[in-house]
Each structure stands twice: as structure tokens, then as C-alpha cells.
């Protein structure tokens, strides 16, 4: 993202600014914890409506920290064959931990459904429960120098045990009118376009 992200066109609301600062503080603490051999995952779950900028926030975080942006959309990992989805998850996590990065886990609710909501233990419900367990096992293997950002539109569907693995949970809300105006203004300023805001 160092070559593609245009910071001058990105508007960070006060709410997300606080989240960003928390993640950066934890990154510095994690460096000390890693020196002492204490494992801790710097993990944040962003939830809210579609189109509110959750994935873009992850790219912004990678840009500001100078880390690679590793993006994983769980809807693309689901396989119809028994056990294949769990293997796909393991492969993706093994790839991500090969270097310090911002690891974006998008559409978490597609794959980590509450195990209490799965009625059958041997069929689809049982397979989804096994996938959720695999996801948590791989999550726990992540080193301190990985920053995890999860994203979901349906936090109510996510298994409680996985939710506990996210140290910070933040609702990304739709911008109000003033925030929308600030976002548009910043973008137009960056591309050098004048706009008569007084006419609005």
C-alpha cells in the first residue's frame, strides 16, 4: 500500500482516529512484550454497515505503519469439500505470519458462526464448528509483530470465543453530514478541484 494508498484523499474521523492511536500504542507495547517472550496479539474487530470504510482503514493502518497489507476475505475461502475450508485457513495464516504485516480478516461472520447456533454435530453445523475452531487455533499462533484487523457486518453472528480474541472492538458508523463534507473537501483539495461549498 506504500505505492497505492493516497493519504491526502483519506478522511479519518475522530472516532477512528482514537482506534488508530490505540493500535499504534499497542504495537509499541507489543515490541517490548516480544522481547520478554510474552505473547499478545494486537487485534481489533471493526463492525458496522457495509461501505463505512472498514477495509480502507486497514489499508490506512498498513500505510502509516509501513507494513505490508495482507488481505483475507473469508467468503473466498469457503469450499464445498469437507475439511478443505480449514486447510485453506491454515494456508492463508501460514502465509501471513511469514513477515510482520497488517493482517486484514474481512467478512469474519462468513466463517465463524456461533457454535451454539449450529444444531447438527455431524453435518453442516459440525463442519462450521470445526472451521471456527481451526480459525481460533490459527489465530492463537499469530506472533506479536502481526497487527490483526477483523471486519464484519454481523458481529451478532460471530462465535463468542473468537470475539474474545479481539482485544478491541469498534463500531464504524456511517458519517454524519459534517463528516461527509469534510471527506469530500479533503478529496477535492487533494486533486486540485475547487467546489462552491457555500452553494450547498
Image: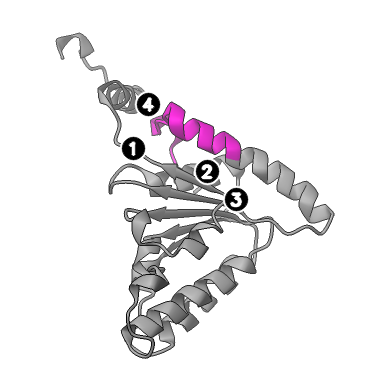
- Residue depicted at 39% across the width and 74% down the height: 77
**Label 3–label 1 contact, CB within 8 A:** no
Q: Secondary structure at mark 4?
A: helix
In this view, 169 is above or below 12: below
Q: Which residue is denoted by mark 2 in the rendering?
A: 61
- Which of the marked residues, 3 or 4, is nearer the chain's N terminus? 3
Q: Residues within 10 Å of mark 4 (few under 14, many from 20)?
A: some
Q: Which residue range is magenta in the image?
A: 4-22
Whole-angstrom CA distance, mark 1 to mark 4, is: 24 Å
Q: Quick one: 13 or 118, which is closer to the camera? A: 118
Whole-angstrom CA distance, mark 3 to mark 2, is: 8 Å
For this view, does 96 lie left or right of residue 45?
A: right
Q: In front: mark 2 or mark 4? A: 2
Q: Which residue is denoted by mark 4 in the rendering?
A: 190
Whole-angstrom CA distance, mark 2 to mark 4, is: 20 Å
- Residue depicted at 66% across the width and 43% down the height: 26
Q: Which residue is denoted by mark 3 in the rendering?
A: 67
- Residue depicted at 32% across the width and 42% down the height: 52
Location of residue 180 (image quadrant): top left
Q: Which residue is denoted by mark 1 in the rendering?
A: 173
Q: In front: mark 2 or mark 1? A: 1
Amino acid at each position: 500500500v506504500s505505492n497505492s494508498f493516497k493519504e491526502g484523499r483519506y478522511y479519518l474521523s475522530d472516532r477512528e482516529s482514537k482506534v488508530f492511536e490505540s493500535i499504534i500504542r499497542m504495537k509499541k507495547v507489543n515490541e517490548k512484550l516480544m522481547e520478554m517472550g510474552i505473547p499478545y496479539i494486537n487485534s481489533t474487530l471493526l463492525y458496522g454497515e457495509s461501505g463505512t470504510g472498514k477495509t480502507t482503514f486497514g489499508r490506512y493502518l498498513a500505510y502509516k505503519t509501513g507494513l505490508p497489507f495482507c488481505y483475507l476475505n473469508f467468503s473466498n475461502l469457503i469450499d464445498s469439500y469437507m475439511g478443505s475450508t480449514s486447510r485453506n485457513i491454515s494456508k492463508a495464516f501460514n502465509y501471513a505470519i511469514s513477515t510482520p504485516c497488517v493482517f486484514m480478516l474481512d467478512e469474519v461472520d462468513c466463517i465463524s458462526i456461533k457454535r451454539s447456533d449450529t444444531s447438527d454435530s455431524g453435518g453442516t453445523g459440525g463442519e462450521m464448528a470445526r472451521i471456527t475452531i481451526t480459525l481460533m487455533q490459527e489465530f492463537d499462533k499469530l506472533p506479536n509483530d502481526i497487527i490483526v484487523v477483523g471486519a464484519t457486518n454481523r458481529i451478532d453472528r460471530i462465535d463468542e470465543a473468537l470475539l474474545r480474541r479481539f482485544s478491541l472492538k469498534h463500531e464504524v458508523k456511517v458519517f454524519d453530514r459534517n463528516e461527509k463534507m469534510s471527506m469530500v473537501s479533503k478529496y477535492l483539495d487533494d486533486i486540485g478541484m475547487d467546489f462552491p461549498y457555500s452553494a450547498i
